[in-house]
Image (cartoon, rainbow, N blue to C red):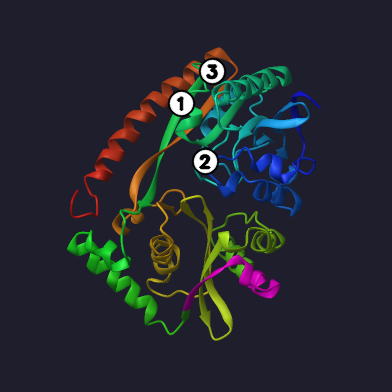
Amino acid sequence: MNGIRFLESLGGIPAADWDALVPDGNPFVSHAFLHGMEAKGCLREDYGWQPYHLGIFEDGRLVAAAPTYLKGNSHGEFVFDWSWAAAWERAGGDYYPKLLVASPYSPVPGPRLLVREGLAAEVMRNRLTAALVDEADRLGLSSIHANFLPETDLDAFDDRWLARSDVQFHWHNRGYADFAAFLAALTSKKRKNIRQERAHAQASGLTLEMRGGDTFSDAEWRQIHALYELTFDMKGNHAAMTARFFQYLGRTLGPNVQVALARDSHDIVAMALFLRGGDTLYGRYWGASVDVSGLHFELCYYRGIDYAIREGLARFEPGAQGEHKLARGFLPALTHSRHYIAHEGFRRAVADALRQEAAHREAYREELMAHSPYADR
């Protein structure tokens, strides 16, 4: 079992072997998270997801890997290439299937080229990207996309890969002693607004709390999932995560899953679900059956900041998009993706579009920074 292999499931890979390649404990590329999605019904071929994980083996041991999928559409990726697909298909080509290196449904920066750190790490990352290109060419695929890459992965993508960036909003811990110390770092207007929002949530009559995933019963997980599903349905979106997956996360990751809750008597009426890994808290899923002023901000943002300060975490990444996060202490941060387009002419056209996009993005980021909520901006 030596050499390069593409795997249709993580089920045959020991969790310890895979997780030994994850350098920062990022939960979204952990064996538990990725295999859980496969095993608990979140990834289905009719949803456009077919696991096709890349592994490099030496002496029967996994030494490098990349979470990889054959994609039949562009749903659940958060790096949008719908216009590329439409253009290629108007020209008579088949854009799908394509190869995607990512954590499904998770717009979370983190390692994608998984290697054991050491002198050979750079070589192994280069082998992974070369293997991806070879496989896409062998299968006659239109493209490969590697989304939400950390800076440590970027050098492994040569000039054949097109660079793309976007903006998220992340909170950084400046050594705050408590939430009040964080508020003191903001401008007076932003500080006042946050206090008002928290006061509205506290005055709602709901019981607010934050608990670890290992403290919930299966019945409570079903309530949490129902809120997630309801909120997706209200927005006309597809709720891909199953109730079985939520329960599995709580049992498998335990206190590395955190849920901020609002209860009306015994019923959970709002929730925000977080994952913790390394020195970072990640906000992922929100759901509510009530409309209470300030409750979304309290559960999704302020409870997360509170937790990060209390636990001494360096960062809190609450998810994709959302300029409203800026006023609540989250600053713009660049995310990175790389894209291999097989057809040379189409690659040039996409490269031209990306150059224009990059200029607009940089101007947007500079404008955001000019409106920093911090007093020392």
* Residue 346: mark in rendering: 3
Which label's residue is closer to the chain start, 1 or 2?
A: 2
Q: Amino acid at mark 1?
A: Ala
Tag 1 and tag 2, C-beta contact below 8 Å: no
* Residue 27: mark in rendering: none
Position in image of residue 285 (x %, y %): 54, 59
Q: Secondary structure at mark 3?
A: helix
Query: Residue at point 65% right, 61% down?
Result: 246
| Residue 38 appears in the figure | yes
Residue at numbered disc 2: 110
Question: Left or right of 200: which side holds 224?
Answer: right
Tag 1 and tag 3, C-beta contact below 8 Å: no
Q: Is residue 197 above or below residue 9?
A: below
Question: Left or right of 116: which side holds 79?
Answer: left
Quadrant of residue 70 within the rendered picture: top right
Query: Residue at point 62% right, 21% down?
Result: 127
Q: CA distance from mark 3 to mark 2?
A: 29 Å
Position in image of residue 100 (x %, y %): 62, 33
Position in image of residue 261 (x %, y %): 51, 72
* Residue 163: mark in rendering: 1
Q: Which residues are magenta?
A: 208-223
Q: Secondary structure at mark 1?
A: strand
Q: Amino acid at mark 2?
A: Gly
Query: Residue at point 43% right, 64% down?
Result: 307
Quadrant of residue 112 within the rendered picture: top right
Front residue of 29/299: it is 29
